[in-house]
Amino acid sequence: MARKVVLASKNPYKVGEALAILGDIPGVEWLTFRNIALPEVEEIGETLEDNAILKATAAARETGLPALAEDTGLEVEVLGGVPGVRSARFAGEGKDYRANNEKLLKLLSGAMDRRARFRTVAVLALPDGRTWMAEGVLAGRIVDTPRGKYGFGYDPLFVPNGEVRTLAEMLPTEKNAISHRRRALEAMRPILLDLVRGALD
Ligand code: IMP
């Protein structure tokens, strides 16, 4: 019988990417916000690690099932790692992706050093309190004007090293092949395989 695992995110873009990356694991039945109630979790942590743990452990506790969560931030070198853990509400509570992008471009206007990286921290939590953590990083730079129609968030502003296109100009399959999210979630695959074969029971 398949093992149910909760994907603890209410962001449909993140859920789509996570399923594209880990959806092929045999023996896992993924439950998402579309078919299971997820707890409201305030992202009050000071780090991506804290927030990923908060989200995964709350979901595992509430559902009684293993839960996988992640927290992602865009860390801009010349801004000392900002927006980082505050990436979602950079331009203020309830502001949209466009407002966040505009704020970032304004802060970087005239800046020569445009190096940045996406960092994802993924956490798998079991209802008994055990947790596993993995990190994925994608280094690149911030462009001057948004480009592309795919992806979400800061994707139209971010060109990975070795690329000329922004993440939003790459097809979803291309982004998912190299992304911070792929690297973090891929590192979770062996743990999920252990879970499926009962090695964590
Ligand atoms: P959180 O992990 O839900 O706190 O998301 C943080 C914010 O980072 C999101 O609201 C997006 O603006 C941004 N973000 C997260 N992942 C990505 C990504 O893969 N590409 C672009 N922006 C992202």
Image (cartoon, rainbow, N blue to C red):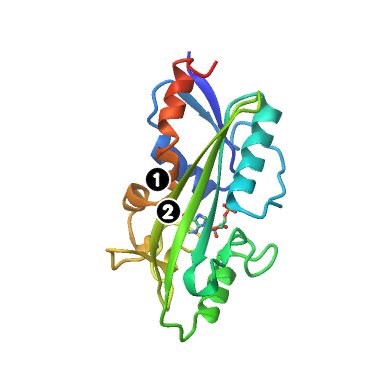
Residue 79, by quadrant, is bottom right
Which residue in the protein does label 2 denote?
137
Up-down: is 105 above or below 83?
below
Q: Amino acid at mark 1?
A: Arg
* Residue lying at 52% horizontally and 19% vertically, measured from the top left: 200
SS of the residue under disc 2: strand
Question: Quadrant location of the C terminus?
Answer: top right
Residue 142 percent across, percent down from the top left: 42, 71
Label 2 with label 1: CB-CB less than 8 Å: yes
Q: Nearer the viewer, residue 7 or 52?
A: 52
Residue labelled 2 has its Cβ within 8 Å of some atom of ligand 1: no
* Residue lying at 32% horizontally and 47% vertically, measured from the top left: 177
Residue 21 percent across, percent down from the top left: 39, 40
Which residue in the protein does label 1 denote?
183
Would residue 28 be found to the left or right of residue 80 on screen? left
Residue 156 percent across, percent down from the top left: 43, 66
* Residue lying at 57% horizontally and 66% vertically, measured from the top left: 83
SS of the residue under disc 1: helix
Residue 14 percent across, percent down from the top left: 50, 47
Residue 147, by quadrant, is bottom left
